[in-house]
Amino acid sequence: MTTPTQTLLRLGTRGSLLARTQSGLVAKILEHRHADLRVEEVVLVTSGDVITDRPLHEVGGKGLFTKELELAILRGDIDFAVHSYKDVPVTEPLVDQEELVIASVLPREDARDVLVSLGTRRIGDLRQGARVGTGSLRRRCQLLAQRPDLVIEPVRGNIDTRLRKLRDGLFDAIVLALAGLKRAALFDQAIMTPLDVSEMIPAPGQGALALQCRRDNRRARELLSSISDPPAVTCVLAERALVRSLRGDCLSPIGVHARLVNNAVQLVAAVGARGGEPPVLRASATASESNSAVMAAYNSLLEQDVTRLLHGAAP
């Protein structure tokens, strides 16, 4: 119960184990930073939780995981929401963003992907024609570029559901994000191998948590911004800027990862054909300013005819 001297913030979250875990983490950090603050979690069901029988790119993209949370913010039902930043659309959002703002980005967890297999540690060691479960077009094209013989099949559901399908023999391997496994305390090194970024470039924003509120909610913005991590903000905004330059959407298999090294932004990107097919174009850039790194990577991809690969036409 909130005392008269306390501030209450209502945090909207999905009901999955990972979403509740991430929201609980944010609530603890905020309450530890601000002794007069109480964070109350409000569980909401999103379209992405309800539609589980089709790949996300067929029904609206990852924005289905954020749509209901954003609408709840706009209605005033909640004060802010915690999103996995990779689920926040860069282009074609399902909710008008004019009155919304990402007020904070927490320190980033490990952004790498993980190969999960009961008997194999490397993509190259999977059996001929192995079945690999992933609903990500980004992962699909990068896997097929390395192993054209693999059979890539969609898999939906929360983390434990996907792991159960693997153990039941429906797949030889699945690919998951390391950050979610670590936050949910489900990482098992006996069957899980992190993939180097050079082998599988992550999704833009992967491993980062975005805290979103109304643009005109000054108190919420002040509280949320107090726990924001500037290096994470710099890297994620650079990754999303490249996607925006490429006019990427839910059918665009784009991997982008940025990191800060000696005060410079190092950015790598991998772009497959629309729909998740090879070939995969790659680019890298290093610059003291993030915008310069983004433009250098973008120009490199343009020189490789990325527009035709993604959109089927010249720019």
Image (cartoon, rainbow, N blue to C red):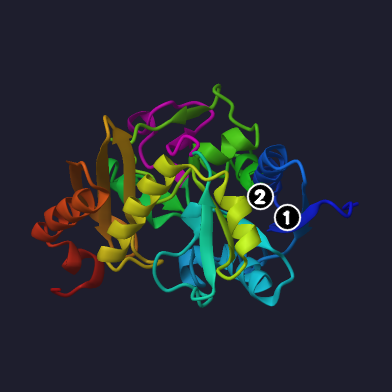
Q: Position of residue 310 (x, y in %)?
A: 25, 66
Measuring 17% from the left and 68% from the top, which residue is drawn there? 308
Q: Which mark is residue 19?
A: 2
Q: Quadrant of residue 121?
A: top left
Q: In front here: 154 or 14?
A: 14
Measuring 26% from the left and 54% from the top, which residue is drawn there? 271
Q: Quadrant of residue 164?
A: top right
Q: Which residue is denoted by mark 1 in the rendering?
A: 15
Q: Which mark is residue 129?
A: none
Real-space Cα separation, disc 1 to disc 2, in angstroms: 6 Å
- Give the amino acid type for the residue marked by disc 1 in the picture: Gly
Measuring 12% from the left and 53% from the top, which residue is drawn there? 300
Question: Considering only vertical position in the picture, is 208 above or below 114?
Answer: below
- Give the amino acid type for the residue marked by disc 2 in the picture: Ala
Question: Considering only vertical position in the picture, is 175 above or below 89?
Answer: above
Taking 92 as reference, is 26 left or right?
right
Taking 119 as reference, is 29 left or right?
right
Pointers 1 and 2 in contact (CB under 8 A)? yes
Q: Position of residue 229 (x, y in %)?
A: 48, 42
Q: How many neighbours does mark 1 have within 10 angstroms: few (below 14), some (14-19), or many (20 or more)?
A: some
Instruction: State the extent of the magenta-drawn residues as a range.
Output: 108-132
Q: In front here: 187 or 53?
A: 187
